[in-house]
Every structure is written in structure tokens, then in C-alpha cells.
């Protein structure tokens, strides 16, 4: 099941940190070297984490000359969140609405730089 693969990919602290950093970087993403520097990761460790996140469909890499730029897949993130919220509140969406609305504001409305800095700290 795709949701299990995606949740499994995020269930390791290092991969979660990479993923959060890329979410904060926005659609332009980050080069692998930038990710390694921001999180203090060895290249081989980062490569393994990027491969698992890519296989789960949570991130995608685009080759730019000799480097690869990685970005979070917003469609995959949205699909996973919708899957998790599908049966929210036993058919009473008005109960979940304040949570959904507050979570969306908190996750999506912070300044981009603040999100990248926060992701790098976690």
C-alpha cells in the first residue's frame, strides 16, 4: 500500500529531516550538496535517504548538469494527508474542520525562510 510505503519512508529521523527541509525549500528544492551541508550528513548517508524518499514518491530529483536538485512532491504529500484524514471524525467533518484549517495555516503560511531554518534544526 502506497500510504504505508510513504509513512515508512518518513519513520526514520534522518529521512524525516531531509523531507522537512525539502518541504521548506519549496518547489525550487535543493541540490544534494546543499541538503548535506544543511543537515550535516555524509554523502553516502544522504544518498540512501534520498533513494528511499524517492522510491516512496515523496521527493523527486531533477538533473542539472552534474548535480541533482531534489524537491518535495506536493501532490504526494497532499494525497497522504487526505488519506490520513479520510475517515476523520466519524463522518462529522465539522469536528475536524478547525483542526484542518489551523494545520493548513500553520504548515503553509509561515515565511519560507522560517520553514527552512526550522526544518534544519529538527
Image (cartoon, rainbow, N blue to C red):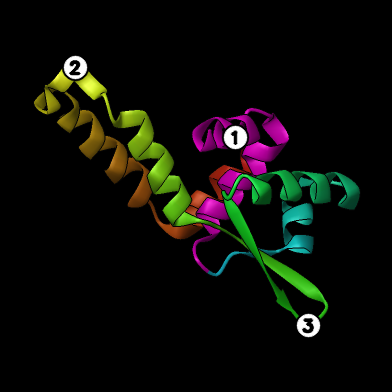
Q: Does the CB distance between marks 3 and 2 fall below 8 Å?
A: no
Residue occupied by mark 3: 65
Residue occupied by mark 2: 90
Q: Which residues are magenta?
A: 1-27
Question: Is the residue 97 above or below the residue 74 in the image?
Answer: above
Q: CA distance from mark 1 to mark 2?
A: 25 Å
Q: Residue at x 75, y 44 (%)?
A: 49
Question: Is the residue 63 above or below the residue 73 in the image?
Answer: below
Of the image marks 3 and 2, the number of the one nearer the N terminus: 3
How would you rate the neighbour count of disc 3 (Cα within 10 Å): few for under 14, some for 14-19, many for 20 or more? few
Of the image marks 1 and 3, the number of the one nearer the N terminus: 1
Find residue 7 and report its horizontal and vertical position in percent. Answer: 56, 31
Residue 90 in the figure: left or right of residue 58: left
Q: Secondary structure at mark 1?
A: helix
Residue occupied by mark 1: 5
Q: Quadrant of the C terminus?
A: top right
Find residue 30 and report its horizontal and vertical position in percent. Answer: 65, 64
Pair 3/2: label in front: 2
Amino acid at each position: 500500500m502506497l500510504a504505508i510505503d510513504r509513512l515508512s519512508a518518513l519513520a526514520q529521523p534522518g529521512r524525516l529531516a531531509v523531507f522537512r527541509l525539502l518541504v521548506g525549500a519549496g518547489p525550487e528544492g535543493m541540490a544534494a550538496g546543499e541538503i548535506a551541508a544543511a543537515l550535516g550528513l555524509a554523502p553516502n548517508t544522504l544518498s540512501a535517504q534520498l533513494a528511499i524518499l524517492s522510491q516512496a514518491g515523496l521527493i523527486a530529483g531533477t538533473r542539472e548538469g552534474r548535480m541533482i536538485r531534489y524537491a518535495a512532491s506536493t501532490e504526494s504529500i497532499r494525497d497522504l494527508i487526505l488519506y490520513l484524514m479520510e475517515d476523520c471524525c466519524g463522518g462529522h467533518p465539522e469536528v475536524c474542520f478547525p483542526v484542518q484549517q489551523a494545520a493548513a495555516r500553520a504548515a503553509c503560511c509561515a515565511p519560507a525562510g522560517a520553514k527552512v531554518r526550522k526544518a534544519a534544526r529538527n
